[in-house]
Image (cartoon, helix red, strand yellow):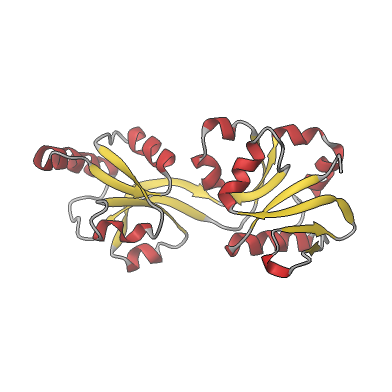
């Protein structure tokens, strides 16, 4: 279909449930022929809409691609801001919702008794380099945001370790000295003997409706975007 509107929804987790609830509140019934595991869906009575269930990170990548494989997508602001600049410039955040609220933070082991601020961390980083001849390692899934934040705080003597699993365990398994991670309550960090640096708050995130800028020219699409912005 020429004017098919493609919408990306997170394929699992809390964000998926929140997005499905937004559709429900706006009287848009989502249909998946094969049940919850189906990667494609539709909206009852709306033949011009296709639902695609994807990883939250992939939704952002697809919104920015030139082939317009998605027109609209729901994902976290943290994932958008972590993406490359050439991706961000092709995406517009049309609506922020009061769901998926979390903060990207800098967390250190509880027993770092003399470190409370990013300035303290900078001092420690220089000492670490002088005594051990290497840089502090920061384990994270958010390399771009972490690097930008650390530099803005004057912390330069560090290296990024890409995390692919549970970031919280990294300082206790020898893979890094500290971490940056997304947290909603801080309880998981505390349970893993980590604490947030006083001024180590990098980014507040939430669920957002994002659209590919080139898709906004379509009038039917504009109506749908406005509809999904009303009840949530």
**Number of marks in the rendered image:** 0
| The quarter of the displayed image where residue 28 is located | bottom right
Q: Residue furthest right?
A: 45
Q: Residue at x 28, y 51 (%)?
A: 178
Q: Is residue 196 left or right of residue 172?
A: right
- In the picture shown, does residue 195 fall above or below 143? below
Can residue 180 be seen here? Answer: yes
Q: Is residue 109 visible?
A: no
x and y, in percent, of residue 125 in the image? 20, 41
Q: Which of 207/39 is in front?
A: 39
Q: Which residue shows up at 60% across the image and 43% down it? A: 60
- The residue positioned 54% from the left and 56% from the top of the image is 101
Instruction: Give the quadrant of the C terminus.
Output: bottom right
Question: In which quarter of the view is residue 126 placed?
Answer: top left
From the viewer's perspective, is residue 14 above or below residue 199? below
Task: Tell me where residue 197 appears, x and y as whole percent.
Answer: 31, 51
Taking the view exactly as shown, the residue that stands out farthest to the left is: 131
Judge whether 108 appears above or below 125 on screen: below
Q: Position of residue 147 (x, y in %)?
A: 37, 37
Tell whether 36 sits left or right of 151: right
Q: Quadrant of the N terminus?
A: top right
């Amino acid at each position: 279909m020429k004017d098919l509107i493609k919408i990306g929804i997170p394929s699992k987790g809390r964000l998926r449930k929140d997005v499905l609830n937004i559709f429900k509140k706006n009287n848009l019934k989502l249909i998946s022929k094969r049940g919850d595991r189906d990667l494609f869906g539709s909206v009852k009575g709306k033949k011009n809409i296709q639902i695609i269930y994807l990883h939250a990170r992939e939704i952002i990548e697809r919104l920015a691609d030139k082939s317009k494989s998605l027109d609209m997508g729901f994902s976290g602001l943290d994932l958008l801001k972590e993406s490359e600049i050439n991706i961000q410039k092709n995406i517009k955040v049309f609506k922020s919702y009061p769901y998926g609220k979390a903060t990207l933070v800098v967390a250190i082991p509880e027993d770092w008794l003399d470190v409370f601020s990013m300035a303290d961390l900078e001092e420690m980083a220089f000492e670490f380099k002088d005594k051990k001849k290497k840089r502090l390692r920061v384990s994270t899934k958010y390399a771009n945001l972490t690097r930008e934040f650390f530099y803005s705080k004057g912390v330069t003597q560090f290296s990024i370790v890409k995390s692919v699993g549970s970031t919280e365990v990294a300082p206790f398994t020898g893979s890094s000295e500290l971490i940056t991670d997304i947290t909603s309550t801080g309880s998981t960090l505390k349970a893993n003997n980590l604490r947030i640096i006083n001024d180590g708050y990098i980014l507040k995130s939430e669920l957002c409706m994002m659209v590919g800028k080139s898709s906004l020219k379509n009038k039917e699409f504009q109506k749908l975007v406005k509809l999904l912005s009303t009840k949530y």
